[in-house]
Amino acid sequence: MSANYTYRAWDGSQGDGAIDLETLLDLLSDDLLENGDLTDAIERLLRRGFVTDDGAVDGLRDLLEQVRDRRQELEERGNPDAQFAQYQDRLAEIESMERSGLDDLLDEAQSSGDERRASVTSDAVAERRLELDLLPDPFADRLSAMDHYEFVSSEAREAFEAMREDLRQEIADAYFQGVSEAMRNPDPEMMARMGEAFDAISTMLEQRANGEELNPSFEDFQEKFGDLFPGVNNLDELVALLAERMAAAEAMFNSMSAQQRAQVEQLSREMFSDMDLGWRMDRLLANLRAAAPEAGWGEAQRFRGDAPIGFGDATDIARQLGELGAMEDLLTKGNAAQALGELDLEQIKRHLGPDAAQHLERLKKVTKTLEDAGAISRKGDRLTLTAQGVRRLGNQALKEIFALLKKNGTGEHPTVFTGFGHDREETTKAYEPGDPLSLHLTKTLSNALARGGGVPIKLEAQDFEVIETEALSRSATVLCIDLSMSMPMRGNFVPAKKMALALQTLISSRYPRDYFGLVVFSEMARELKVEDLPTVMWDYIPGTNLQHALALSRQMLAKQHGTKQIIVVTDGEPTAHIDAWGTPEFNYPPVPETLRLTMAEVLRCTKADISITTFALDLENTMFPFVEQIATVNGGRTFYPSPDDLGGFVLVDFLRQRRKR
């Protein structure tokens, strides 16, 4: 056996559509930090779409717009009402042709000079005209009556027979186009086979519904009637094929006016009865409705075009409109995850093209990529960040802030001080008296060999190369973040959370021996676990209780060793405190009691050798420069960054102070 290969130019569709984890976290981070709900953040991302290095990915809103555009295009293709009206016009023309034939017959008889012939012809013509005048108005009844009418005009008779055959074929196409080619030009023998096939299908469905063994079996059916339904491999596929087509035909006929629909239904019954298929069709339809209730029976589609369109083609459009309508329902009513799980890629490709299918496939990989990487987990119908996800989000925030620092020309400032410890750097130096004898063996031996020593190597003091170590100190930090309502109102909320994630990541990765605690405060303060930081939201209760935040931070630091500091991020003056009964009290503007109790807590922190660094946002909106008083009393530092610069200010200050210590 030999393999055959085909080649084509790379167009981007050959990739697997995967989106890397870092890109996804970057796309989600701001929304998640601002709104605090991962499920909703992913929902919004999937609906609005996104842009990656590989190009733009259309969201579900874009797909919804394409679905609606496609529906409108199909609806304007034509109208089966106009097609039916054409048959009415054809019948009127046939009647006119017959009346002209009657006039010609009478004129010929009268001009013949034969009085008897003229008299007989006149009576016969009068009788035919009366018969035409008495034809019923409804089209189906009129057509049925003319089927028994004896035409005088051979031209009219031929036109009537052609029209009736066209109409019969139109109705058959509506139900069977694409299902059975045998119905296109059936002869009596083929009609008999179709009737037998319908009965066999109904029998199998009834037996299956009753839990009985199929007799005939599907294999027997396929052997006898398989040529009528090509491409079908089992009973379920046959049911789906017939139910889809017949339900679409019903939806197409339901789109017509009530009067025209009634006429077509009557014609359908008469024509199937003429072909000895009437009761068999009724039985088959009843069984198909029971076997495939989800096929869309009883639906109606809207056709807004003006041009006539054949019933078979209109049914095909009705089927497409039904599929597009189901897509639209999924895209509008369900959540994004549900829509992605239920949308059919093949249908999307068939209706909207391969590009839309590729976008949908990439959207489907968003949640899967996050889950496979262990960044998120499911709890019921909700998605939550895992501990690994929080770490990755912190790494993203840290990279973003350092990238901004690098861009702005501000960054870490290395110290020249070295000291004892275990955190080795990549640098060495020549040994000097007093240095710890922490030899770098490779470089020491290389120095000895370079000096000309042979084997065995003889070391001298001048060969010694020692490893430089970074001075170690333990630091304990509590970060206090203001969660009052003013933070999101002024655009400070997301930068503060992003900075907190970055600082925690920096400390845990570079200084794992350090302690890091987190306190959030508004009317009251509370300790927060780092893993809850991405989803924490601001408080709707007014108040900035800095007193309680400092007190809680001091209690947390009392259990720690080493240098201690509190970092406060706030955008306002203290407006709340804890009264003597342990109840929060809010006042705006700040009252002297709140400021006094807050400053008393600053003094307690100072006595406990805890430095307080304050990052004041939007200071111009405050009435009292209280943060400056904190720095004066405590000896700490105060910074006034913009929200965009907050992360850089905090990290750089932390690193500077950490190295000084």
Image (cartoon, grey):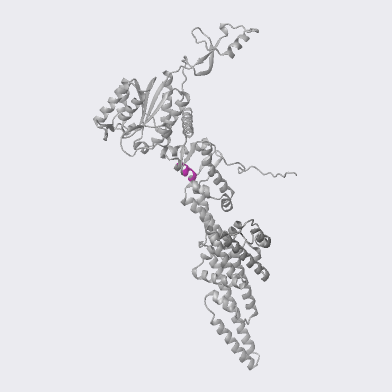
Q: Residue at x 75, y 44 (%)?
A: 2
Residue 541 shows in this picture:
yes
Residue, far right: 1
Magenta: main secondary structure? helix
Q: Quadrant of residue 272?
A: bottom right
- In the rendered image, the residue lying farthest to the bottom is 115
The quadrant in which the N terminus is found is top right
> Which residue is at the front of the view, 118 or 393?
393
Look at the image and give the residue range highlighted in magenta. Answer: 41-47
Residue 547 falls in which quadrant of the image?
top left
> Which is nearer the eye, 172 or 573?
172
* Left or right: 644, with 595 as reference point: right
Residue 423 higher or lower than 212, as above or below: above
Percent position of residue 199, x then y: 61, 66
Q: Which quarter of the picture shows residue 446? A: top right
Up-down: is 625 above or below 333? above
Across and down, in percent, residue 457 comes to 63, 8
Q: Position of residue 655 (x, y in %)?
A: 43, 23
Quarter that holds the C terminus:
top left
Horizontal side, residue 284 vs residue 611: left or right:
right
Q: Is residue 347 left or right of residue 408?
A: right
Image side of residue 524 versus residue 399, left or right: left
Q: Is residue 157 above or below residue 516?
A: below
- Image height check: is 242 above or below 401? below
Q: How many marks?
A: 0
Residue 46 located within the stretch drawn in magenta: yes
Q: Is residue 271 magenta?
A: no
The foreground one among 101 and 376 is 376
Find residue 614 and report its horizontal and vertical position in percent.
35, 27
